Image: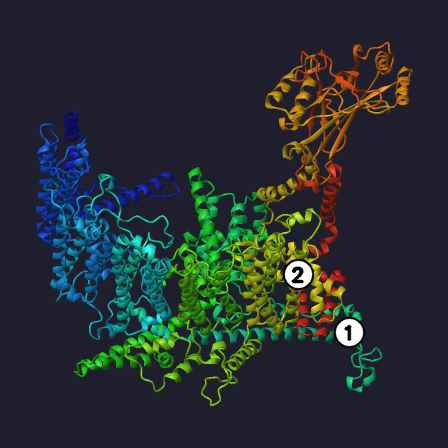
Amino acid sequence: MTPTAFLILCILQLHYFHKHFLHITSKQDGQYQFPSFQLENQPTDLAKPSGFAIRCLQFLYKWSHIILDFGWRLLEIHILKLCLLTILLAAVVDPSAINLIFILLVAISLMAYNGVSVVAQSSSTIAAVLVIVKMVYQLRMVKEEPFTANCSFVNSSNFNRSDNDWVGFRKVPDIAFELRVYISVILIVTLRAIIVTRHRFFAEGAPANQQPKIGIVFPNITVKELDNGLISCMQYLWNYGFYRFGLEICFITMVINMCTRLDIFSVMYGVLLLIMFMLSRQALAKIWGVYVVVLGLLLPIQYLLVLGIPRGLCITYPWDRTAAAQTFTAEFVQWLYLPDAFFPPKAMILIGDFCQLLFACCQWRVFNLETVYASEPYEGGSNENIFRGAKYRRIFENPVPDFMTYTKSYLDVLKVFIFNFMYWITLAVVFVAGTSRISLLCFFYLITCFFFLWHGNEFFRKPIKLLQRQWNIFLTGNVLIILVKVILQVVGCVHLPMLRRNYCWVIQLFGVACLKFNNQNTDDITAAEPVMGASKLTLDPLDKCDAKTEDAGLVLDAVVFVFLLLQKRIFSSWYFQWVVLEHKVQSALASRGAEYIKAQVTEQTRKQKDDEAKVMTKIRRKVERIRERQRKFKGDGAERPPVEAVPVEVLGTPQDPNFEEHYQISRSGDYYMFEGSDSDEDDVDILAPSRPPEEEIDTMAHAVGPDPLQMLNYAVMNDNIKTTVQDIKAVNERSESEMGSEFASPGQSRLSMLHLAQRRGTISSEREHRDRARMSSIVPEVAGIAGPPAVHLSPVQSLTCLHEVDPSTSYRPHHRGSYPTSPHIPRSVSDTEAMMIRSRLNDIPDAPRENQFTLDHDAATTGWEKGFHVLVFSRMFITRIIDVINNKLNRVSRAFRFVSDKLRVEKRRMKKDYVQKVREFFERESGNGAVISDPEQTEEAIQGLEKSALSKQALKTQKSELQLDLPDRDEEEFQSQHNVIMRFVIAAYFALTARSELLSYFMILLLQMTSASVLSLPLPLMLFLWGTLSIPRPTRAFWVSVISYTMVIVLIKYVFQFQFIPASWPATGNPADPLYPPRILGIERTNHYASFDLALLLVVFFHRSVLKSLGLWRSAREEEAEVKETIGERVDAEGVRHEHSTATTSNYTPEILFTPDVESKDVVDYDGEGKDQPAIWTKVYAKTVHFFNHLTEYTDRLNTNIYSYLFLCDFICFLIVVSFYWAFGPDAGSGDNIKDYFEENRIPTAFLVILIVQFLLMILERALYLRKNLKGKLVFQLILVLTVHGVFFFYLPKETGRPFAASYPVQLWYFVKCTYFLLSAYQIRSGYPTRILGNFLTYNYSYMNLYLFKIFIIIPFLMELRNIMDWIWTDTSMSMSEWLKLEDIYANMFVLKCWRMAEKRYPTPRGTRYMTFWKYLMGGSLLLLFLVIIWFPLILFSLTNAVGVQNKPLDCTVEVNLGGFQPLYRVSARQDALVQYTPEMYDSMLMEFSKPTGKMGLISQEEVKQAQSFIHQYSKDDIWLASLESDSSTIWTISPPAERDIVAYLNSSNDISMYFKWTFSFAPRKGKVSQVVSGTSQVKLGNETKTVLCQMLVRASEYNAGEQLPALINNLYPFFVRVPSTGVSTFVRALQPREQKNFRNVTVQLKREDFPGFNHTGEVQWWNIQEPVVNPANASDISRDVQPHPYITMTAFIDKIFPQAWAVVTGYGIVGLYISLVFVIGRLVRTWSSSQSYRIMFEDLPSVDRILRLCLDIFLVRENREYRLEEDLYAKLIFLYRSPSTMFKWTKNK
């Protein structure tokens, strides 16, 4: 079949595809042409399916060809390497003598590059021959016995003694699997031939300059295009990546090979690597050929070691003999990579040697290429060392662009990350490697990491030789560690059992491990005959050494090597020189940002005070005008004597002529108070915080266009989604063009879409015709008012026509064209008139076509277009949301970006000046003909230039010389091209950078929360008692202290992680104890003991870099102190001393320790220069006192008000305590939730104390806030910080028995409280606000503020408590009642203001129907809510069986008595006699009641439906069958007189009834659920029945009790009963419609027997009740039997009960629920809806701005202690509410 199928395929190819194949492979005009589908000119309207499909095809077609060409080119370049790798795999997969030729061919081809083609063809030929030979060897005629030998020293029958396997021939069951490697060689060589043929086909006849270069994927990309962009950089790396980084790749491959092999060759490679590190690149180029030859020779040699001596020769190795067996164990032989008959070396590890040889050969060719292009430039660039001689100092010769100063592309962003931040990533990797394994070798990583972390970016400023020397030492130490670990494999794999028994500490100290040995071939050796040199690696089961010997950490060592090598290459690049220059400039401007911020804060403070003074001046001026009018109105101002003329004894008394009574003044308002102009009332916004001028314009803002809610509102108003999308696009374009930049003011960003909706609305032709005449006269008037008459209203302008424009401005010019915007239409014109004006203006024919407004309603919109436009709108909506988020983030980073922009300009000037001076220096030296031969002199000269150019003193001359510093155009263009996601990333980065100190605070708290130890406790204490209280920001000393102490923590933890230190140190203590000493001290042995410490260090160092970049790391005084210290000292050539003085804290002046930014002259000097130096404690005390005095007396405070956030934190802590009391108090054994305590109606004392303390703290916080007591707040903060940390980390774990780290509620409470501490410290630093005006929720008039304020009012007593506390702790002239009135007025006016603002922001067009969407949304929601409230009780109780829980009965008791006498019969159902219905019983009952039958007593279909409906209300779990014994469980003990009375009663003619009582008892439950439910039925006895009963009772000797017949009682009890949760149980009428006629009949009989001992006669009696045998009319098949029943049965339908949580709602039943819920809520709703007319006067006010302003004026004068003004303004407010006419005038729209 195979030849036939091959022939068919060939025929199909020739007949159908051959011509097309020839066509596509033919050349046309010397160039290869791909067939084209001609899709370029097709329409691509994505709103249509065809356009979308064409666009997808174009995209796929384009990228498929790009990927295809890229893949072919990669194969052309690397196919030879794939061939050699495949040939090597063929040899190492099946080690044999015949495959040795493949190894030789590989080694020869790699060392002789020109012979690769011959080697490939030879390998293919050899592989084909071997395939044939091996197939022939599988024939039966070939025998293996002649090649087999018998060696006497091997007794194992499994040992292969044949040389056939050694040669490479063996009998196998699957020949295809055996030949797979050779077939792979043939295939890969064939593929190479195809690729070579294709390459020759396209390259034939092409000019030499058009042929692709060797190894180049992208021919047009050279080193010149490297910095053009990210794509160009990636293409360059594809072309010249190995050329630039080949040496590093070779070193990395060598290290990976070392960590993989772990044998003697790894040691040799490690020694070679150490030697290579000591040589320069030029020296390496000279000896690299020797290195390649050595690797080429080692490859076949190692393969020979794998093969060993043929086994058939029976030759033993020297290490296999008995004398050497003790030394040369199997593990040691493997490490030495010696041949062995039983454990041969692994051949697969030669793949690593092949890769090492391959990369070494490629690098050899790179060296040759560098030699060829030594005198001319190469397209890939130069690998010459840039630090040869003094060339590295020539910064002006840097061939790469300055990416640190100008960020022009994403490639520059990537460069900043790599060259500036890769240093920190490298140190983080080193830290992880050092802490992951506990050993002395890894301790080197930790110490070295701390050394470089301590220096930070200051390390970049070191002299380059010193920098590279220190980094090379670090790198050499890493290689030595890898080499030592490889050597320790001998110790670990050979002597590990002995070490574990006797020297466990050695294993722990050096991290000895065994990673290599594996008993993989032990199956070939019999257990009875041990082989010489066999493995001795057997662990003692009694070994108690707990050292980890499975992992030596070599993987992390290799990763560290990669990062260190990459960082070394970064240090030696031209790009890094710009980073060095950036940090030098940062160092020069280390305090410049602090100066800017200080000036900014000073300006803000001044402006804040000026605004307050301006407001008070205006208020006084208004009040003075009121008083002036009052004097004119009353005319008695001149009659009052002056104060000096009044006797002292009557001053302030009613006898004083100038005396004025408070309440009289409060009610003395009059009309004259509202006379005059109040035009200046809106000049100053009392609530608006002052901003510095620099912050008014934000270049990062992107807030143009409507906000998301406006977009959504307009989309709902507009029915056409397509026009909605077009309008929003037009609005966005118009907004950006009008602003002329990317930002807009808040007023201009509120775009309204009202009039566009009006214009698109349907207006009747009659109304339009009626208004045209009127509009013809209005338009000229409007044009005359607004500006030029010929104006045009574009769709964009129609959307922005409701902007709040200045009335004095007639029109706003358009920035992009000559047409102005929409004219301002007077308010007297109605909305319809305004709409018609705009319609007429839009008809002007002179307007440009693109600005005209067109309607597209006639065009049909398909479903595809609707869906497409919905997606477009969704994208725009999401984009707008992200833009809003970006604006919030940009507002957070506003100050940061302001300082950063200022410093960026100064840095550019300093860099430009420095580069210019260096250029002039070298030009001057070259012009003089001097040869710079002394590097030291050059170094000193360059340092002098740095000091002169890179200093703040040079800024003055630079500003005068470089006045004009224009931004780079490419940088601006790159920033303008950011999409919304990139803008979000940038905004988030700036926000994170601006608040990096908060991230550091968070990591400190997270470290303390996870460790909760004494060792880490000083960090949060330092944070709250020092860092957060430092003004204006935490000092450099604080951050250095945090860094130092964190490093100390890591070192202490690392030392105690050594396992030879006892884990139980100290020896006392229980590990389960929350105060277990190692845990509480922080030295407990854990796996991830330093993870959070690393995170803290990285975050703090990141924050330090931010401070340095902003010029905030030092203050001006610190710089002056350091300059004084360095005067007269000579700078060391290597800069070591300078770096040390910068990084350490020993040189800090004491005054800088706490107050770095204080310029006061009254600072106490403790520099130690005096003769009498005070004691250390005296110094500390004095510094501490000075620190806190400065904190409380600092003048340049920018006051702020964050009490709302403090209250929120306290409230959250309060809720946490209430919800999770079990985590804060001792376990009382009553449950884990406070709900259990409330259910038991008891409150633990500890819980009450915690709540009261928390509540009192909140009250105290409010009191301090209202009194503005800053010192009290500081003392309160200090006491609270110390108390919280002492209680929560020591006392609380002891009381609760839970460690802090294991209690999540406590951790959450602590985190929230720490947030409170941070906010509180910020409040202390900033100071309390000078004015506290109203509630913090009333500072903005949005929906969120409105609803939050409503919630605030609804919470019981919250508003009242706030008002009372405010009245108590606020100085005022008002009484409490007046205070409450004022607060109530202000609250109502705020609510009205919110509604008025919402109406403006989301306007409703006039004359249009209310939209259906909002009708159903609001009205439908209210309707649904009212319906639910009305029908809720009925629905709730009707769903009892659906939502309730099962009420399982515990007992069923039946009693039968006669009249009022003692019960005759009493019995209870046994436990097994009270059972639930099974599914079969339930289905049987349904079947019996499915049709009218006489058997069940149903006679009509209606009764059947009722029965079925009733049964379906209950599930089978709610139906119980009670089976009661026929014999009474109690003896009928009755006295003879009573018995005679019964007989007489039965013989009488009175009506006698027998009562049947059943009782069900349940488990006790809380709520109104009965524990016992009973029911009763009765039946009158007939004469016959009475006679029979009487005969049973008569004691006559002629009667025999045993022969008495029972009495038949008809219809005594119901078989089906309903048992409710409360009340009385009744029979089920639906199942027994004939009522008593359907009840059960019973037989009653009195039984007597003699039981001696019960009474004097020895006779006892009891009653027996049974069901009769035949009762077909009344009995059910469920309980009917052919035999007499020994029991009576009942079926109970037991109602479900509501869950216990619903007991409050359901406890009072339906009527109670209706009264308490429906009627009360209905009454409240009726009050809200029916009393609207009485509130119209106070709720439908058009404008409440003046009333709000008056309230705020009262607040303001009160804060300024102007109590007479407060009384006057309050009187004015009261009169306003008393005078409706004044209220009407004051609330009109302006």
Quarter of image, res 644: bottom right
Q: Secondary structure at mark 2?
A: helix
Residue 542 position in % (x across, y down): 37, 49
Depth check: give the residue in front, 261 or 968.
Answer: 261
Q: Tell me the amino acid under the disc marked 2.
A: Phe
Quarter in which the N terminus is drawn: top left
Q: Label 2 to label 1, Cα distance in Å?
A: 52 Å
Residue 1078 point in image, percent of width and height: 48, 61
Residue lying farthest to the bottom in this orientation: 1171
Which label sits on residue 633? 1
Q: Looking at the image, can residue 1389 be seen?
A: yes
The dot on residue 1255 is: 2
Q: Nearer the viewer, residue 1614 or 1262?
A: 1614
**Residue 1774 found in image quarter:** bottom right
**Side of 1508 relative to 1708 (left or right):** left
Tag 1 secondary structure = helix
Q: Position of residue 1622 (x, y in %)?
A: 74, 34
